[in-house]
Image (cartoon, grey):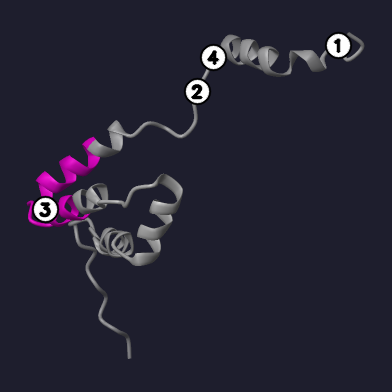
Amino acid sequence: MSSPEKEPSSRPKLRCSKYFDALWFCYSPVHQMQQYYRLGVFDNCTDKFKAFFDCMMLKTKSTPELQEILEAREKEKKHIWTFRTPEEASYYWKELYGHLDNPDE
């Protein structure tokens, strides 16, 4: 017997569980005491609440609108690497490691 194939949905899967977990942990005594020990203040968890609320609000959007929002956010993200021209790369390389070219000096 073959199982019925699931049709690929055009709606992107948006999971808010990671945001909920982060918010839940933020309110835990462990996290609060860590923050108090490290920074001297308790964490009010505003950023984590905003992220969770934002995710829940995105779930109410229509598929085209959701796709548009997610694509716009992806374009806004800064890339993890900084791309440089060969001239820029050479300059920064020499600035950081130029002293290794002439070890006698």
Looking at the image, residue 61 sits to the left or right of residue 23; the answer is left
Q: Secondary structure at mark 1?
A: loop
Distance between mark 4 and mark 1 Cα atoms: 25 Å
Query: Count of labels shown?
Result: 4
Please report whichever mark, 2 or 1, sits nearer to the chain's N-terminal start: 2
Q: Nearer the viewer, residue 50 or 29?
A: 29
Q: Which residue is labeled 2 in the image?
A: 83
- Residue 79 percent location from the top left of the image: 42, 32
Q: Which residue is labeled 1 in the image?
A: 102
Q: Secondary structure at mark 2?
A: loop
Q: Which residue is labeled 3 in the image?
A: 57
* Label 2 CA crowd tier, 10 Å (few <14, some 14–19, many 20+): few
* Label 4 CA crowd tier, 10 Å (few <14, some 14–19, many 20+): few
Magenta-drawn stretch, dominant element (helix, strand or loop): helix
What amino acid is at disc 4? Thr
What amino acid is at disc 2? Phe
Distance between mark 3 and mark 2 Cα atoms: 35 Å
Q: Nearer the viewer, mark 4 or mark 1?
A: 1
Q: Which residue is labeled 4 in the image?
A: 85
Residue at image position (59%, 13%) is 86
Magenta residues span: 52-72
Q: Residue 24's image quarter? A: bottom left
Q: Nearer the viewer, residue 60 or 13?
A: 60
Distance between mark 1 and mark 3 Cα atoms: 59 Å
Please report whichever mark, 3 or 4, sits nearer to the chain's N-terminal start: 3
